[in-house]
Amino acid sequence: MNRQREATRFALDSLPDEFETFCKENRPDLVASKVFAQFGDHYRANDEKRVDWFAAWRKWVRNERSTTPRSQTAPGFSVPTAAANSMPVFVAPASDPVHHEASKERAREFVKKFGRPKASASVDTSAKG
């Protein structure tokens, strides 16, 4: 007889070892205890049921946004290599409406401090017709 397991509400109060291990091995950029707190809050608040809570955790961890900064420099800037010129390079961040105004302000500050960036040598800006 093939009997299916019954779905249950989230009832874990602490981070199980297997949950923490999975997170550390698959997403070392995350802090397992913080992700677990968000995971538990979400499922408690929504009163959702699951048959396999470990499977739900694995999916949650895989889909979680990284908490590690992209670089140690200010957002929107990167430090050039020694082979490049010594002026910082402005890097436009990915489209994000929440940070759009801050990105525009960083670009204005960059231009004030360093002037307008020169076109890359690999970009042909001449009009051909």
Image (cartoon, helix red, strand yellow):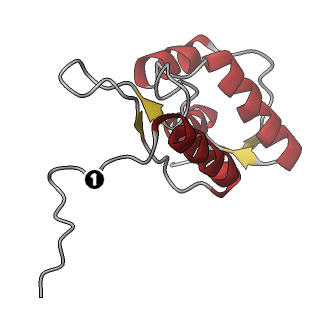
In which image quadrant can residue 96 be found? bottom right
Q: Quadrant of the C terminus?
A: bottom left
Element under disc 1: loop
33, above or below 91, in the image: above
Which residue appears farthest toward the top when viewing the image?
Answer: 17
**Which residue is under mark 1?**
119
Which residue appears farthest toward the bottom when viewing the image?
Answer: 129
Q: Residue at x 17, y 22 (%)?
A: 83
Viewer-nearest residue: 115 or 37? 115
In which image quadrant can residue 74 be found? top right
Q: Residue at x 53, y 34 (%)?
A: 113
Q: Is residue 81 visible?
A: yes
In which image quadrant can residue 82 be found? top left
| Percent of width and height locating residue 114 | 46, 36
| Percent of width and height locating residue 109 | 60, 39
97 on left or right of 63: right
| Percent of width and height locating residue 70 | 47, 29
Classed neighbour count for the residue bearing mark 1: other residues with Cα under 10 Å, few (<14), some (14–19), many (≥20): few
Q: Is residue 47 visible?
A: no
Q: How many marks?
A: 1
- Under mark 1, the amino acid is Ala
69, above or below 56, in the image: above
Q: Residue at x 49, y 51 (%)?
A: 94
Q: Residue at x 48, y 16 (%)?
A: 24
Viewer-nearest residue: 89 or 92? 89
Viewer-nearest residue: 47 or 8? 47
| Percent of width and height locating residue 64 | 57, 38
